[in-house]
Image (spheres, rainbow, N blue to C red):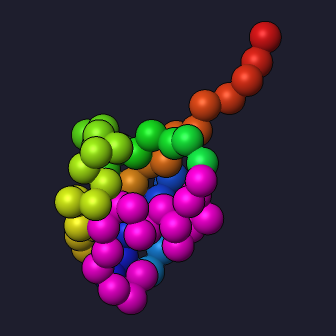
Amino acid sequence: MKITINGTIKTIDNAMNIHNFLISEGYEDKLVAIAINNHFIARTAYNDYTIQDNDIIEIVAPMQGG
């Protein structure tokens, strides 16, 4: 299944929910926001939303600055 993550096309073997996807991408303990197909997904829905073929996923992390 092909998905786009932050502008990069990636192939994943199995459908998975957002929570498991974040773990597989190394974001397990990081504070991030997720948008899929231009819709932000609430953190409470990460276990319920299953990533689909051709989804466009944006992972946004807060940055410090001044």
Q: Is residue 66 left or right of residue 9?
A: right
In the image, residue 48 lies at what x, y percent? 21, 60
Q: Quadrant of the C terminus?
A: top right
In the image, residue 54 lies at what x, y percent? 28, 68
In the image, residue 35 lies at what x, y percent? 35, 44
Residue located at (61% from left, 65% from top) = 26
Residue 43 position (above or below residue 66): below
Q: Is residue 47 left or right of residue 12?
A: left
> Is residue 37 in view from this perspective?
no
Residue 45 position (above or below residue 25): above
Find residue 50 and report its image quarter: bottom left
Residue 59 position (above or below residue 64): below
State the residue in front, 24 or 12.
24
State the residue in front, 14 or 43.
43
Residue 34 position (above or below residue 10): above
Q: Residue furthest bottom?
A: 13
Q: Magenta region: which residues?
A: 12-29
